Amino acid sequence: MKVPQSTPKPIRKAVFPVAGLGTRFLPATKAIPKEMLPVIDRPLIQYAVDEAREAGIDQLIFVTGRGKTAIVEHFDTAYELEHTMSGRGKNLEVLDPTRIQPGNLVTVRQQVPMGLGHAIWCARAVVGDEPFAIFLPDEMMVGTPGCMKQMVDAYNEVGGNLISVLEVPESEVSSYGVIAPGAKVSEQLTEVRGLVEKPKREDAPSNLIISGRYILQPEVMRTLEGQSAGAGGEIQLTDAMAKMIGTQPFHAVKFAGRRFDCGSKTGFVEATLSLALERDDLADEVRAVMTRLLAQ
Ligand code: G1P
């Protein structure tokens, strides 16, 4: 294992690829970005941003496309709303998570959907020459501490590149990026020997999949430059990362917590119910509703 000689450069920037069309949730996502679909009372993107901030990351880079302005509006000051609410004596605290320090939200455009690798590459000028995090907001990671905080803690130990992974049934590996695990560093941390995007079940090197959180070194941007299309005809981030293995430390962090695949309808419903059952203001009523429905 390559251990950094000194404390690695801090992770200050996070890239959120949010240009996707969200076709799986049509017609809900015809006029609303899928990242704005709420799990109870927060849009999906808010959960990812909260997770970033908990990990000490406050510079947010959204890779957006047409029809995605609601995401940026969400993190802007809604002057009329605040004015009206204050006038009525209402508490504005509920809006606190939507507040961003001036200058800390940057958007770049991905004009044509060409894959996750391409989306990340679109942020290269804003990322510059620093390590950065990536969040796929569809993947909702719930834990204490959150997934990215767990990753940043591991990064401070080993530096280099890290991805969060989790086990899925073998029948599901072909929907994801899959790792070939190397030496185990600790219960939670493993070296990564190889990476393959959406392998056939029989070709998958393990059942450990990349679960939508990354800490990467800026060299990945140069690797993505001019990269040809991979699985699904798209420019894959996984392919670029695979090329970096061996040139820089590369580790996988097994997230201690729960993951909800909010890119699927069932995952979305599961996230909603699960979070509702944990909230003091909702748990009793929601449990009663569920019991009643299950008895039908
Ligand atoms: C992307 C990544 C894949 C990862 C997955 C997690 O795939 O390319 O490696 O496992 O997210 O959700 P997508 O879901 O965009 O096809």
Image (cartoon, grey):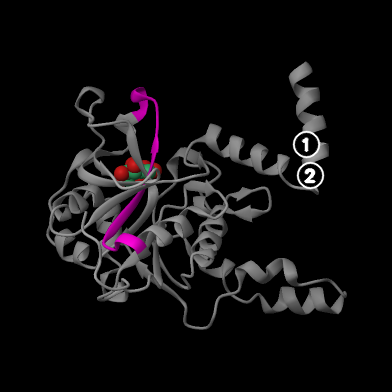
Tell me the residue at 69%/69% (across/down): 95
Please, what secondary structure does the residue beneath circle 1 have?
Answer: helix
Looking at the rendering, which quadrant does residue 3 occupy?
A: bottom left
Mark 1 surroundings: few (<14), some (14-19) or many (≥20) residues within 10 A: some
Looking at the rendering, which quadrant does residue 195 occupy?
A: top left
Residue position marked by numbered label 2 in the rendering: 282
Compared to residue 188, the image places residue 286 above or below, namely above
- Please state which of residues 248 and 227 is positioned toward the viewer in this rendering: 248
Please check the rendered image and state whether residue 9 is part of the magenta-colored stretch, yes or no.
no
Question: Which of the four quarters of the rendered structure image does ligand 1 lie in?
Answer: top left
Compared to residue 290, the image places residue 282 above or below, namely below
- Please state which of residues 174 and 32 is positioned toward the viewer in this rendering: 174
The image shows residue 7 at horizontal and vertical percentages of: 32, 72
The image shows residue 96 at horizontal and vertical percentages of: 67, 71
Q: Residue furthest top?
A: 296
Left or right: 183 with respect to 69? left
The residues colored magenta run 157-172
The image shows residue 170 at horizontal and vertical percentages of: 34, 24
Q: Residue furthest bottom?
A: 102
| Residue 98 seen in render | yes
Q: Mark 1 CB in 8 Å range of ligand 1? A: no
Q: How many marks are shown on the rendered structure?
A: 2
Mark 2 surroundings: few (<14), some (14-19) or many (≥20) residues within 10 A: few
Left or right: 268 with respect to 12? right
Please, what secondary structure does the residue beneath circle 2 have?
Answer: loop
Mark 2 → mark 1, Cα distance in angstroms: 6 Å
Residue position marked by numbered label 1 in the rendering: 286
Tell me the residue at 40%/73% (across/down): 12
Tell me which amino acid carries mark 1: Val
Tell me the residue at 80%/73% (across/down): 85
